[in-house]
Amino acid sequence: MEKRRIILVPFPAQGHVTPFIQLGHALSLKGFSITVVQGGSNQVSHIPGFQFVTIPESLPVSQLKTLGPVEFLTKLNKTIEASFKDCISQLLLQHDNDIPCIIYDELMYVSEATAKEFKLPSVIFSTVSATTRVCGCLLSNLNAEIDMEDPEVQDKVMDDLHPITYKHLPTSGMGPLDRYLELCKEIFNRGTASGIILNTARCLESSSLSWLQQELGIPLYPLGPLHITASTNSSLLEEDMSCIEWLNKQKSGSVIYISLGSKAHMEAKEVMEMAWGLCDSNHPFLWVISKSVPEEVSKIVSEKGYIVKWAPQDQVLGHPAVGGFWSHCGWNSTLESIVEGVPMICRPFGDEQKLNAKYIESVWRIGIRLEGEVERGQVKRMVKGLIVDDEGADMRDRSIGFREKLKASMRVEGSSYNALDELVKFLETS
C-alpha cells in the first residue's frame, strides 16, 4: 500500500527550512511520504526519500533586504499564488488525490487559501518560540493608533505573560505600523487551519502555550525540540568538519563557541573588539564567520582560536570541550544549546531574537546578555563569567536541568512525544 503524502511548505530561509526538514523526517518515520514545496532560491534537494518541488515564480530571498520584511512577504505571497495552486493541483493528480494535509509556514500564508480551495486540511507550522507566536497574535489584534514609542506603553506588562511588555513586541525595522499590523493579521489569522505545530516543549513555555490554546481554540502540537529525534542535515551552507578535530584537542568545558547565525552582519570594529576580548580571556574559542576574515583578525585569533565559515552546530554544542555558546539567539540555536546543557552569551540582532534572549536571561536563567557596543574588556569578563565563575556554573546546572526535562518530553509518554502522536492520528484520519 502506498504511503499517504504530506505536503510541507517552508519559508525559504535556513532558520525555517531546518525545522521543516526535521518535521518531515519525524513524519516519514511514522509512515508518511513527504513532498517539500519550495521557492526558487535557497533550496534543499538532497534528503533521501523526500520529493522536492519548486515554485517557479518565487521571489529570491535576497530581495528581503531591499524590500524590507513587510513588502517582501506581501509580494512573495501574491507572486507565488497562481503557480502554487498549479503545483498543488499537479501533486493531487500525481498522487490520486490522496494528500491528507498541507503543513505550511505561517509566513507562507497563501497556502491556507489554496488548501481551502482544494478542500484539503491545513496545519500551520510556527518555527519560532511559542512566546514569539503569542506576540504575533497580540500584534494582529493591536490598534494601529497605539503609540509604540510612548515609554508608558512600552513598559506595560502583557496580561498573563510576565515578563513580556509592549516593547518586546517585534515591531522595529518593520516600516509603517499600520501596514505591518495588516500583515500580522494575514500571518497570525489561523483561517481554516486545523491546528498549529510548534517546535517547543511544555517544560519550556507552558504559560505561552496555555495562552495560545485559549486564544486560538484549535489543537496545538508542541512536539519539539525536533532535532532530538529527527537529526538530518538540511544546511544550505557547507559545514566545515575540521573544527571537530580541533575540539577533540581541547580540555573539557573550556571552549566558547561563537556563531551569530547565517544572516548576521557585524561592523569591522565590533569583530576586532570581539577578537581581542576573546584572546584576552585566555580561553580557546571556535568562531563561525561566514564572510571573509580580515587579516588582522586572523593574526589575533591564530593562537587561541579556530575560525570556520560554517560549523555542524549540533555536533559542536554536543562536544564535551564546549563550555559556552555566544549566540544571536535564533530559536533553532536556542533549542540546540538548551538540549546540550550549554549556557549562553546572548547577542540578539532582530526583535524575535531579543525576545528569546529575554527568556534565556530572565525566565530560564541560563545565559547573560551582552548589551550596547561590543568592547574587549566586557567580552573578556563575560567569557570568564560563563566558563569559570560560579554564576556560569549555576547557569550550566540550570541548563542541564532543562536538558533532562526536554529529553524526557521526547521519550514515550512525554509531552512532545504525545503531541507528535496526536498529530499523526489527525493526519491518518484526515
Image (cartoon, rainbow, N blue to C red):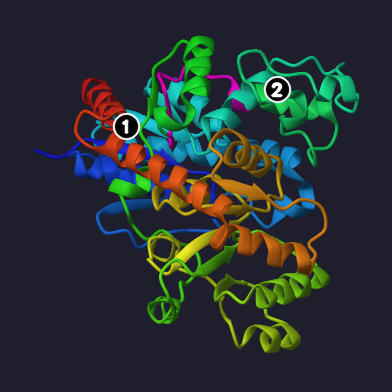
The residue under label 1 is which amino acid type?
Ser
Point out the tag, 1 or 2, that comes first from the N-terminus.
Answer: 2
User: 10 Å neighbourhood of mark 1: few (<14), some, or many (≥20)?
Assistant: many
Foreground: 385 or 155? 385
Residue occupying the far left of the picture: 1
Q: Where is residue 278 in the image (x, y as percent from the top left)?
A: 66, 72
Camera-near label (1 vs 2) is 1
Q: Which mark is residue 139?
A: 2
Mark 2: which secondary structure?
helix
Q: Where is residue 122 in the image (x, y as percent from the top left)?
A: 41, 25
Residue 55 in view of the camera: no
Q: Which image quarter is the C terminus in?
A: top left
Tell me where residue 146 sits by quadrant.
Answer: top right
Q: Residue 416 carries which label?
A: 1
Helix, strand or loop: magenta stretch: loop
Residue range (magenta)? 186-200
Foreground: 403 or 268? 403
Mark 1: which secondary structure?
helix
Q: Position of residue 283 (x, y in %)?
A: 57, 74
Foreground: 390 or 323? 390
Specify whether 244 is left or right of 429. right
Q: Is residue 190 magenta?
A: yes
Q: In this view, does 389 lie above or below 183?
A: below
Tell me where residue 260 sits by quadrant.
Answer: bottom right
Number of numbered discs on residues: 2
The residue under label 2 is which amino acid type?
Leu
Q: Residue at x 22, y 23 (%)?
A: 425
Q: Where is residue 419 in the image (x, y as percent from the top left)?
A: 31, 27
